[in-house]
Structures are given as structure tokens and as C-alpha cells.
Amino acid sequence: MKKKVLLFSTFIILSFICGVIASPFFREKTYQIKEWTRKTTSPPPVSKEVILYFSDSQEQLLVPVKRRVFFGENVSTINDQIRKVLEELIKGPETKSLSPTLPENTKIRAVYTRRDVIYIDFNSSLTSNHPGGASAELVSVYSVVNTLLENFPLYSRVQILIEGTPHNTLVGHVDIRGPFRKNPEIIKKP
């Protein structure tokens, strides 16, 4: 019995010594991996060409428009970039042949992402100042959805919130209780 205890104690002591000797090698590799991942992250681009979807003159279909968006120092996360692109959409088109898709006083309260969904929380102006009508409502919803999913392809759905909560519709026509996927059918063909 004493021989087994002595053998077991020797094994434990040798294991401890081996662990102490080998631990710096494991620590060094972990450090190298952390350094490598730190160096590969790059700051967001200073500017980016994006595609915004505005309404055609009949307010029935969406027309893609390229626009260069400039990101300032305070645009450091993907959520900040999403907000900046949406702010450009809210500004409206730069040409008179297209129509804006969102009411002028629309503000973005919050932007966040989870898994494959982008959540956009608008203020109540989106609903209270909306011109109404089924096609105008459809164009508004899909201008947001298509713009975001075109420019942020890591995501596949967009959920629209008003004042922090899901609503049934914007102004009575399009069900916005769940997230939307991109809709290529509403885009005007060249």
C-alpha cells in the first residue's frame, strides 16, 4: 500500500513540475493569437458608396441610387454605419425625378442587430407624418429594408419598430409586426 501511495505522489509531483515548465509555452501562443486578431481588425471606411432606394415619380416602385456616404470619427460600429446610411435615405433623393420614401421629420431612435436581423427603431413621425396609401406604405417599408440589406449583406432581415415597440402597420396597410426580407419585385427594372 505504501508503494502505491509513493508512486501516486511521485506521479502528481512530476505532473505539477511538467505543467509549470510547459505553461509559458501555452501562454505565449495565446498571446500571439490575441495579437494577431487585434492587428487584423480595421477601422470602418472613411467613406463608402451605398445604394439607396427611393420612389419613382408614380410612387409605385423603388429606384436604386448610388450615393457616397462619409463616416465621421463617431461612426465606429456596424450599427453606427447602418444609422448613417438610413440618415441618407431620410434626407431623400437629390433629383426631382424621384420621391422620398420616408416623412421629413422621421428620426432614428435606435439601431441594433441580433443574429441576422437589423432592428430599426423610428420615432412616431414615421407613422404620424406618413402620407398614407397602400403603395406609399409598401414603398416606405421596402425602401428601408432593401437599402439596408443591399448595403449590409451579413444580415437577411429587417425589423421596423416605432417608439421602441412593434406596430401592426405604419398607417393601416402593410403588416410590420415581423422582420422583412429583401423584395426585388418592387425594384423598377431598367
Image (cartoon, rainbow, N blue to C red):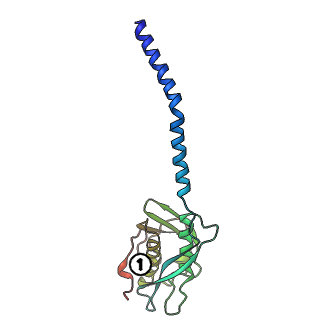
The percent coordinates of residue 96 (x first, y second) are 53, 93
Q: Is residue 25 above or below residue 78?
A: above
Q: Is residue 107 above or below residue 10?
A: below
Residue 182 placement, left or right of 52: left
Res. 126 in view: yes
For badge 1, the amino acid type reads: His
**Quadrant assignment, res 81:** bottom right
Query: For the view shown, which residue lies furthest in the left direction?
Result: 185
Query: Relative to the observer, which residue lies in front, 172 or 32?
Result: 32
The percent coordinates of residue 130 (x first, y second) are 52, 81
Q: Is residue 96 above or below residue 170?
A: below
Residue at figure coordinates x 51%, y 48% from the top left: 33
Query: Relative to the observer, which residue lies in front, 37 or 149?
Result: 37
Res. 178 in view: no
Callout 1 secondary element: loop
Q: Residues within 10 Å of mark 1 (few under 14, many from 20)?
A: some
**Quadrant assignment, res 135:** bottom left
Q: Which residue is labeled 1 in the image?
A: 173
